[in-house]
């Protein structure tokens, strides 16, 4: 049995380029740079479980989260009566948040679980009763 060996040239060999069959080498690929992702007000409402609320209520709650729980401020501050608003007042209907910063905030243990605000602490009398019960259970064990 006999076989002919047919050489396959790669585009990197000088011999193949010399024949003129190869088009010019492609330019090196540029690094892929995506635009930063943003969350709008509707996205924030969905993430925090506030979709059913009125937009004004969503804005008020987002401002509270920014003041009390460290929600990242939006990239584009709100302008009211010709003045740039700072802090939580920068949150408005057209606010856009950095998605990475918001996702990092959501992953923190101090973030509200499932978008719900943390429950207030139990009253002191209830805590005393619970502590007494815990001591009794520990004494039995």
Image (tube, rainbow, N blue to C red):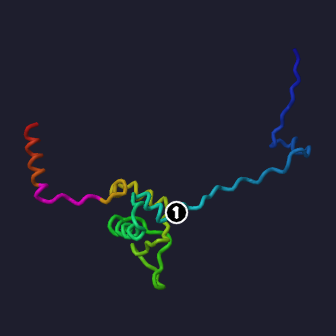
The picture quadrant where one finds residue 103 is bottom left
Name the one closer to the observer, 59 or 84. Answer: 59
Magenta residues, as a range? 118-127
Report the number of numbered marks.
1
Element type at mark 1: strand
Residue at (47% x, 63% y) in the render: 42
Question: At 8% across and 38% down in the image, what residue appears?
Answer: 140
Tell me if residue 63 comes above or below residue 8 in the rendering: below
* Quadrant of res 19: top right
Dividing the image into 4 quarters, which one contains the N terminus? top right
Residue under the image location 84 percent in, 37 percent down: 9
Residue 113, percent from left and from top: 34, 54
88 relative to 14 in the view: left or right: left
Q: Quadrant of the C terminus?
A: top left
Residue 110 quadrant: bottom left
Magenta residues, dominant SS class: loop
Farthest-out residue, top: 1
Count neighbours of disc 1 (C-alpha within 10 A) and say few if under 14, some if 14 to 19, many if 20 or more: some
Residue placed at 10% from the left, 46% from the top? 133
Q: State the image coordinates of residue 61 (x, y, percent, origin top left).
A: 36, 67
Q: Position of residue 16 (x, y in %)?
A: 87, 41
Q: Is residue 19 left or right of residue 30?
A: right
Give the residue pinned by disc 1.
38
Residue 60 vertical position relative to residue 5 in the rendered view, above or below: below
Residue 121 drawn at (x, y percent): 21, 59
Residue 80 vertical placement versus 54 (above, below)? below
């Amino acid at each position: 049995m006999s076989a002919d060996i047919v050489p396959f040239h790669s585009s990197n060999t000088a011999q193949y380029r010399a024949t003129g069959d190869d088009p010019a080498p492609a330019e090196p690929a540029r690094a892929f740079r995506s635009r930063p992702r943003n969350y709008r007000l509707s996205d924030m409402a969905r993430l925090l479980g506030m979709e059913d609320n009125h937009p004004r209520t969503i804005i008020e709650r987002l401002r509270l989260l920014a003041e009390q729980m460290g929600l990242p401020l939006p990239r584009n501050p709100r302008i009211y009566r010709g003045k740039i608003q700072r802090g939580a007042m920068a949150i408005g209907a057209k606010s856009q948040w950095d998605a990475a910063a918001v996702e990092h905030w959501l992953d923190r243990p101090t973030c509200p679980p499932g978008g719900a605000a943390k429950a207030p602490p139990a009253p002191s009398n209830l805590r005393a009763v619970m502590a007494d019960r815990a001591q009794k259970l520990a004494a039995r064990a």
